[in-house]
Image (cartoon, coloured by chain):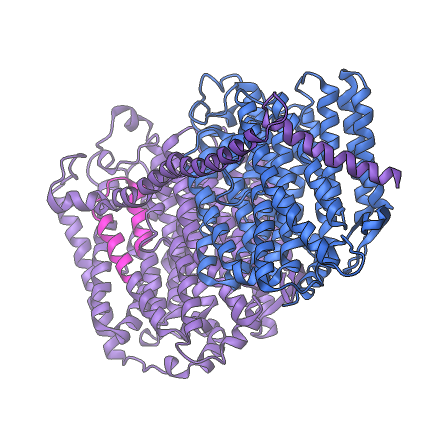
């Protein structure tokens, strides 16, 4: 029942916020998100670290067709639910110094988004998954299209077409899989694991899923919507997209491709992992020369997600556990980085690193938090990024040592572009833009402190999360039948 | 032995207090807090050393908690204390304490005083983790952590863009090495299913000499050492790192961090003893680096740059020693080098302090009268590094060269050539700085003064150590008993069992040893004499910038290696980045938009409504699905 609660709280609260006055919308939204976080913490504490699906529910939806409204939480889901529940209140709090027009709609959309994301991460019925997968697009589409930058219309349109295009492939695949289930048919995801499809069919379904999830993350070469969308969207939407929504894609790889089409993966896995690794290097190299901080972090995120995908495709425990812990770490780091950029932008009206400089002289707190998030992002040991990248790279290395070595170049290039951005913005002499920049406000510290805290928690004691996901991951690996 | 945990924790505590309380804690207190941690850690290290000797020679294992557990792989957060880590502990906390005390005086006028001590403490924490860890991943925490601190301290004066660039260069070049190290760890995990030294080495000892896996592991780990210990081709960051405050150069870029690579090889001696090919490579790289560094040092005019290239060169000697399996002699040199090179840097700092931040030795001269303590200690260090007996450098360098001689006489000859250059550039530095007449401005001359006690005291202590440190390992030929080598011997027992042939080399006769010593000492003395003639008798001063000619110009500009790296790697990466961003992204988009147009054209023919916004259709479709599903749910 906990799952149902987690699903309903943000949706109900979203409805409530929609009908409240604009000036109290953000407080109510924050309160709702905190209640959601508390509920998720209850789930985190009560969760038993085994492979079973817990706190579940199931209602008949279209009983004649075997489609149910059912959801539940296993270790893998729990991690993503925690990530969502942890980030959304911070994202809401990060907007407290901004004034958005039609605030009640703005905050309602964030909450609806959260509800849909929780739905994606907990659904145990394939069609319910698909429903939330699509539904999550609507709020973020409006957030970007209404409150975004100058080119928002063109950019969000491209984003929308891209993702819808991908999802259609997935829909076809799901309908086919559903039709293959025995008897009166069922849409339970776990039922799809037992179908034993032929290798040709598996190949087709593999690509259908791959395209859908590759666009969502995005993977090379399906990524050209991403830098523009991340840059043009209002920062809260960018945070939702990069912090949480892209994890839908990685989650999809783990939940669908690995167990449903293992033979397809065996046939096409090399191609998929090579594309992922190309994306890592390609994205990192592009990030090296970017001047717009938001676009730079967008490309860095593109590179990071490539490594997560490569880890999943390497099909071993290190790669999968690495992908899971890296989803958590990346969500925290990227949301923090986008927030730091927003803080700088809101004060200086520029995100161009050529125009910045010397910020550390006026804003030591901002410098320290930025530094911590940057170190997490470049995977320094004892920060969250290290655990993920270490496991991911060792997973890919186990799959193929040369791919592992090439993917490993990310730790060099990551340092190149992140240190360049940090140095240009924070060090050197002050510019006319940064001359009067002020340090962090209280509410900004309240956002950054929990993020920094998590950077070190995951870095220092990752076993508190790895132990939760391990049984589910082992179970998943065991359920792969060739 | 659970008090061992305190050794790294005390400096960490210092970092947290000074870091969080920065600008709120009064300066005097900052210095005391900052120095107290290292001093206490040193006391504990001495205590640990004594207790260890009392209980035998077996390593002590302290398990704290399981850090990363995935599948069957467990990476514990644990410490291993044995002969090697104890010696490193003593060097790090001992020299570290002295440098902290020195910094109280040296950095006193700096506005970032608290920040400086915080970073220095953090460095000690990571350096201690590096040598105390009981597995390769804990070593890697320290390995990257000291790199971070190095970055923060090189760019300590972060208003200066050149300093920031030097800091970034150091971090990135180290990261290149770190990738090698990381891949080495992955291969270790793949081969042995573990990362703990005890487990891994036990299994490795059963493998054959020259097994491909062992060779690959040793090569990959050595790439890491090239970065951290500034060996060819990854050495160019170290001279630039001199942008940091001088105590940083002494502690991080001379005495401790840069010796991490040597520590790692000795720690992994079971691997390396099984991989003769890798050892040969290490010896060649080490020798080449020793000669390259020394030759560049001959013509540098910045007091810190001379010392930096000297460090590169001396590190090369240590690797040369490792390459011929002279593990203990190499470590002996790590130790004596920590004494005399820290002393040289601190002495240079004292000079720079007195010269109002002037670093060009062409503008110095005659300082021995105004800076007597600095001068006296600098002389000791110069004699020590030049390998003139009975000071420490003689014993350690001689120990390495004697082993090299048994391996290859040509290498020995080149090694002696290197020490001739060493002696020459060091005495050149000494004479140009402290002898002759003052060549700076009147203002600087007026300001000349000896440094305060907090700075001269560490100089004196280090001078004593540089003078007598060599007696720790006196060879039998000179009626000694090789105490240090004896103490370290248990470290190689497993390797000797795994590859007995490699350890069964013959000892030189005493006569041979006397000849070798005579040749190298004589050569060093001649070089010193040469420097005396040129710079004291003839009073020549190096040419002004841009006036150098021919070979001198080539060497003065460091063989243009930086320029070559810039042209080959940096520029091509930038070009690739611009190309990928403008052309690559454009091409991909072209395909995407093309696909989009096809879809759009098809859609146009099916158009039912007049409004034509595709997003509207798509949105309606999703909405429709939603409504149908909800309707089904609530009605049924």
> Which image quarter holds the C terminus of chain A?
bottom right
Specify the colour of chain A.
Answer: blue
Question: In the shown orientation, is residue B531 left or right of residue B133?
Answer: left
Q: Is residue A100 visible?
A: yes
**Along the line of sight, the residue nearer the viewer: B215 or B575:** B575
Q: Nearer the viewer, residue B534 or B129?
A: B129
Question: Residue at position x 79%, y 43% from top?
Answer: A40
Dominant secondary structure (helix, strand or loop) of the stretch shown in magenta: helix
For residue A414, above or below residue B227: above
Q: How many marks?
A: 0
Residues B247 and B368: in front is B247
Residue nearest the viewer, comparing B401 with A330:
A330
Q: Is residue B305 magenta?
A: yes
Chain B display color: purple
Look at the image and give the residue range highlighted in magenta: B286-313
Residue B321 locus on image (x, y percent): 34, 67
**Apparent side of residue A57 relative to residue B463 in the rendered image (left or right):** right
Using the rendered image of the protein, determine whether residue B460 is visible from the camera's viewpoint: no
Instruction: Tell me: residue B168, above or below residue B481.
Output: above
Name which residue lies at 50% across and 21% down: A350
Q: Quadrant of residue B388?
A: bottom left
Position of B631 relative to B388 (above/below): above
Q: Position of residue A78 (x, y in %)?
A: 74, 49
Q: Is residue B590 magenta?
A: no
Residue B380's place in the image compared with A4, above or below, is below
* Residue B253 as seen in the image, left or right of residue A66: left
């Amino acid at each position: 029942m906990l799952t149902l609660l987690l699903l309903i709280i943000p949706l109900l609260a979203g409805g409530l916020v929609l009908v409240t006055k604009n000036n109290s919308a953000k407080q109510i939204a924050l309160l709702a998100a905190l209640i959601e976080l508390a509920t998720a913490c209850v789930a985190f504490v009560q969760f038993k670290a085994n492979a079973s699906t817990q706190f579940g529910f199931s209602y008949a939806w279209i009983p004649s067709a075997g489609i149910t409204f059912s959801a539940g939480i296993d270790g893998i889901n729990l991690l993503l639910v925690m990530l969502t529940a942890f980030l959304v209140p911070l994202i809401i709090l990060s907007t407290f110094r901004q004034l958005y027009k039609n605030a009640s709609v703005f905050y309602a959309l964030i909450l609806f988004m959260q509800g849909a994301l929780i739905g994606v991460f907990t659904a145990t019925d394939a069609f319910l998954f698909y429903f939330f997968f699509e539904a999550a697009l609507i709020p973020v589409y409006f957030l970007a299209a209404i409150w975004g930058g100058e080119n928002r219309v063109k950019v969000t349109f491209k984003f929308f077409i891209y993702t819808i295009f991908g999802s259609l492939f997935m829909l076809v695949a799901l309908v086919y899989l559903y039709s293959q289930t025995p008897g009166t048919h069922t849409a339970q995801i776990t039922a799809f694991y037992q179908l034993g499809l032929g290798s040709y069919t598996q190949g087709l379904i593999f690509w259908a899923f791959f395209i859908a999830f590759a666009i969502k993350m995005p993977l090379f070469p399906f990524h050209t919507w991403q830098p523009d969308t991340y840059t043009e969207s209002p920062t809260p939407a960018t945070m939702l997209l990069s912090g949480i929504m892209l994890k839908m894609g990685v989650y999809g790889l783990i939940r669908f491709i690995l167990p449903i089409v293992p033979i397809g993966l065996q046939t096409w896995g090399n191609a998929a992992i090579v594309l992922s690794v190309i994306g890592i290097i390609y994205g990192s190299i592009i990030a090296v020369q970017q001047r717009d901080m938001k676009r730079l972090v967008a490309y860095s995120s593109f590179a990071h997600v490539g490594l997560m995908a490569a880890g999943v495709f390497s099909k071993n425990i290190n790669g999968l556990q690495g992908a899971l812990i890296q989803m958590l770490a990346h969500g925290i780091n990227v949301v923090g980085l986008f927030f730091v950029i927003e803080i700088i932008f809101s004060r200086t009206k520029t995100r161009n690193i050529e125009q910045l400089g010397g910020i550390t002289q006026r804003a030591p707190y901002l410098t320290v938090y930025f530094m911590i998030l940057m170190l997490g992002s470049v995977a320094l040991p004892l920060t969250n990024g290290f655990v993920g990248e270490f496991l991911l790279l060792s997973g890919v290395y186990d799959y193929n040592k040369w791919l592992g070595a090439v993917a490993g170049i990310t730790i060099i290039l990551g340092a190149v572009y992140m240190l360049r951005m940090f140095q240009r913005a924070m060090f050197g002499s002050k510019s006319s833009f940064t001359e009067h920049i002020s340090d962090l406000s209280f509410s900004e510290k309240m956002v950054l402190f929990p993020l920094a805290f998590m950077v070190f928690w995951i870095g220092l004691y990752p076993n508190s999360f790895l132990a939760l996901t391990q049984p589910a991951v082992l179970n998943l690996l065991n359920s792969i039948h060739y | 032995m659970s008090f061992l945990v305190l050794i790294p924790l005390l400096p960490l505590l210092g970092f947290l207090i000074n870091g969080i309380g920065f600008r709120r804690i009064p300066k005097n207190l900052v210095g005391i807090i900052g120095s107290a941690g290292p001093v206490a850690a040193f006391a504990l290290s001495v205590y640990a050393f004594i207790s260890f000797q009392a209980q035998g020679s077996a390593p002590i294992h302290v398990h704290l908690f399981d850090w990363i557990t995935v599948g069957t792989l467990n990476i514990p957060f644990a410490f291993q204390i044995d002969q090697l880590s104890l010696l490193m502990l003593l060097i790090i906390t001992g020299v570290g304490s002295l440098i902290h005390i020195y910094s109280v005086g040296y950095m006193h006028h700096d506005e970032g005083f608290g920040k400086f001590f915080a970073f220095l403490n953090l460095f000690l924490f990571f350096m201690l983790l590096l040598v105390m860890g009981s597995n390769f991943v804990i070593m890697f925490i320290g390995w990257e952590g000291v790199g971070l601190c190095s970055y923060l301290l090189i760019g300590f004066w972060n208003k200066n863009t050149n300093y920031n660039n030097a800091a970034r260069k150091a971090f990135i070049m180290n990261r290149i090495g770190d990738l090698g190290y990381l891949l080495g760890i992955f291969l270790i995990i793949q081969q042995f299913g573990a990362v703990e030294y005890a487990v891994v080495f036990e299994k490795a000892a059963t493998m054959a000499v020259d097994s491909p896996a062992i060779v690959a592991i040793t090569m990959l780990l050595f790439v890491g050492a090239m970065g951290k210990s500034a060996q060819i081709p990854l050495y160019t960051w170290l001279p630039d790192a001199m942008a940091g405050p001088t105590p940083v150069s002494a502690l991080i870029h001379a005495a401790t961090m840069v010796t991490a690579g040597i520590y790692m090889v000795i720690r992994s001696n079971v691997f390396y003893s099984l991989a003769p090919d890798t050892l040969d490579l290490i010896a060649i790289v080490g020798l080449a680096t020793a000669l390259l560094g020394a030759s560049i040092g001959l013509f540098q005019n910045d007091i810190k740059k001379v010392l930096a290239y000297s460090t590169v060169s001396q590190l090369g000697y240590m690797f040369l020693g490792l390459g011929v399996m002279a593990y203990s002699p190499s470590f002996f040199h790590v130790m004596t080098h920590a004494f005399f090179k820290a002393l040289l840097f601190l002495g240079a700092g004292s000079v720079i302090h007195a010269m109002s931040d002037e670093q060009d030795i062409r503008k110095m001269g005659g300082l021995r009268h105004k800076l007597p303590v600095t001068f006296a200690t600098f002389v000791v260090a110069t004699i020590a590094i030049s390998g003139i007996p009975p000071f420490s450098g003689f014993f350690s360098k001689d120990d390495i060269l004697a082993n090299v001689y048994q391996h290859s006489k040509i290498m020995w000859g080149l090694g002696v050539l290197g020490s001739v250059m060493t002696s020459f550039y060091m005495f050149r530095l000494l004479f140009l700085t402290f002898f002759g007449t003052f060549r700076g401005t009147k203002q600087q001359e007026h300001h000349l003064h000896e440094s305060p006690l907090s700075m001269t005291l560490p100089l004196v202590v280090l001078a004593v150590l540089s003078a007598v440190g060599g007696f720790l390992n006196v060879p039998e030929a000179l009626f000694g008993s090789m105490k240090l080598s004896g103490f370290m011997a248990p470290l190689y027992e497993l390797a000797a069992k795994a590859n007995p042939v490699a350890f069964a080399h013959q000892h030189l006769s005493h006569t041979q040893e006397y000849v070798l010593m005579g040749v190298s000492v004589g050569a060093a003395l001649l070089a010193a004499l040469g420097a005396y003639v040129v710079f004291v008798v003839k009073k020549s001063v190096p040419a002004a910038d841009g006036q150098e000619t021919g070979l001198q110009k080539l060497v003065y500009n460091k063989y243009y290696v930086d320029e070559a790296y810039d042209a080959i790697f940096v520029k091509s990466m930038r070009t690739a980045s611009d190309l990928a961003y403008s052309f690559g992204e454009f091409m991909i988009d072209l395909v995407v938009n093309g696909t989009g147009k096809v879809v759009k054209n098809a859609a146009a023919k099916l158009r039912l409504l007049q409004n034509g916004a595709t997003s509207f259709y798509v949105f309606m479709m999703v909405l429709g699905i939603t409504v149908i599903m909800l309707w089904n749910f609530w009605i049924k």
